[in-house]
Image (cartoon, coloured by chain):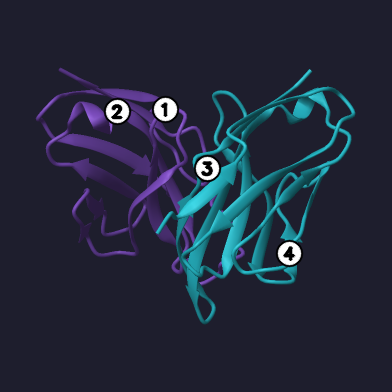
Amino acid sequence: NAGVTQTPKFRILKIGQSMTLQCAQDMNHNYMYWYRQDPGMGLKLIYYSVGAGITDKGEVPNGYNVSRSTTEDFPLRLELAAPSQTSVYFCASSYSRGATAYEQYFGPGTRLTVT
Amino acid sequence: DAKTTQPTSMDCAEGRAANLPCNHSTISGNEYVYWYRQIHSQGPQYIIHGLKNNETNEMASLIITEDRKSSTLILPHATLRDTAVYYCIVRQTFSGNTPLVFGKGTRLSVIA
């Protein structure tokens, strides 16, 4: 298994541009998550999904959108990029059995700079 | 806000046991203690979790006090590759939509 994969690894955006961060997992996990990590800080949850077609906001959703059309993919869309969105973005997924979700597996991250 | 308190940094000699403490005095009865680590620039990696009994796996041991207000992660024979930031997190396992709340963690430096 490749686990959780993210593309691109690095990206520089100009203010006002938009882009989509890709995330895919091949472990048949129901739950998927997007986090951001600012320098020297812990991770903060942006959005999460409990299954295809179902998404919900996390702690810091403003400026982002997500979709979950398949179990495998969970893209994160940035519209009108701002310098405050400069961060490292991590995607994660976890297995669930009934209402119980287990440990999260993380991708390698996307380092985004907005200038 | 994170529900845990950890030291900012610790050093450990290579080959010795690394003992990382965590305080979680407000933990509730249905919350588990999770440990993750983040090696520089990589995504966090799950290590271990427990409810009230001590747990051991191939990576580490988790010792939880009887009152569950604190715990210790033990890496029995630390290597240079264990240098990382270690996060102690409390969370209700049964709710997948409960996010992992990462604090600042403990930066462990393993020294040769």
Name the spot of residue A98 as percent of width and height, x first.
Answer: 52, 82
| Crowd around label 4: few <14 · some 14–19 · many ≥20 (10 Å) | some
Labels 1, 3: front one? 1
Which is nearer the N-term, disc 2 or disc 3?
A: 2
Q: CA distance from mark 1 to mark 3?
A: 16 Å
Residue B102 marker: 3
Residue A55 marker: 4
Left or right: residue B26 compared with residue B48: right
| Crowd around label 3: few <14 · some 14–19 · many ≥20 (10 Å) | many
Image quadrant in which the N terminus of chain B is located: top right
Contact (Cβ within 8 Å) of mark 1 with mark 4: no
Residue closer to the observer: A36 or A70: A70
Which is nearer the N-term, disc 2 or disc 1?
A: 1
Residue closer to the observer: A90 or B91: A90
Q: Quadrant of residue A33?
A: bottom right
Looking at the rendered structure, the kind of residue marked 1 is: His
Q: Element type at marker 3? A: loop
Residue that label 1 marks:
B40
Q: Element type at marker 1? A: loop
Q: Element type at marker 2? A: loop
